[in-house]
Image: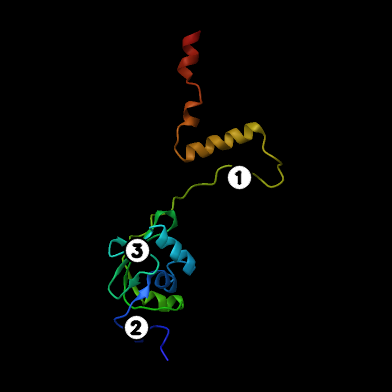
Amino acid sequence: MASETSPGTGGGTVRVDSWIWSVRLVKTRSAGAAACKGGHVRVNGERVKPAYGVKEGDEVRLRQTGGRERVVIVKRLIRKRVGAPVAVECYVDNSPPPPPREAVAPAGIRDRGTGRPTKRDRRDMDRLRALNSRTGPALSATPKPSDASEDS
């Protein structure tokens, strides 16, 4: 009987959608197939279909949600989904480090029980959100003090 971690598949191939699912790069096998069909999976630089056979030594690039790209080298072929500690042993991760998360103070958090925000409160919250994201509509909405002094 063949083992789940595929000592019997030495020199063989495994479907790419099945392999990225079994090493826990995607949550479901159908998500792996959808990623392949959408062009988010590349093996050795080429876009592949879900049934493409990966072999040991292949470089698999998977573009995940949020724009992050995982780059892994196939170290061992497996067909069945295994636990995370075993799955990590099946590939070498050459992915770039994820970008640091921005520490943004939450804008517009209100105390419990204060009721629905008024129109003025909502405009203030929108202005704070615009300042936090550094976009300009909130900055240009305030009148310049020099304009008021020139009119008199």
> Which callout, 1 or 3, points to the residue nearer the camera?
3
Q: Is residue 138 left or right of residue 62?
A: right
The image shows residue 81 at horizontal and vertical percentages of: 46, 77
Q: Which residue type does callout 2 highlight? A: Thr
The image shows residue 107 at horizontal and vertical percentages of: 55, 43
Q: Is residue 115 left or right of residue 83?
A: right
Residue 126 occupies quadrant: top right
The image shows residue 149 at horizontal and vertical percentages of: 48, 13
| Residue 102 in the image: above or below residue 116 | below
Q: Which residue type does callout 3 highlight? A: Val
The residue indicated by pointer 3 is: 48
Q: Earlier in the sequence, mark 1 or mark 2?
A: 2
Rendered residue at 47%/15% (across/down): 147
Rendered residue at 47%/69% (across/down): 29
Q: In the rendering, which numbered label is found on residue 9?
A: 2
Rendered residue at 54%/46% (across/down): 106
Q: Earlier in the sequence, mark 1 or mark 3?
A: 3
Count of labels in the image: 3
Secondary structure at badge 3 equals loop
Residue lying at the far top in this picture: please name it.
Answer: 152
- Determine crowd level at label 1: few under 14, some 14-19, many 20+ residues with C-alpha closer than 10 A: few
Q: Which residue type does callout 1 highlight? A: Ile
Secondary structure at badge 1 equals loop
CA–CA distance between discs 1 and 3? 46 Å
Rendered residue at 42%/72% (across/down): 18
Secondary structure at badge 2 equals helix
> Which callout, 1 or 2, points to the residue nearer the camera?
2
CA–CA distance between discs 1 and 2? 56 Å
The residue indicated by pointer 1 is: 109
- Determine crowd level at label 2: few under 14, some 14-19, many 20+ residues with C-alpha closer than 10 A: some
Which residue is nearer to you in this view: 92 or 15?
A: 15
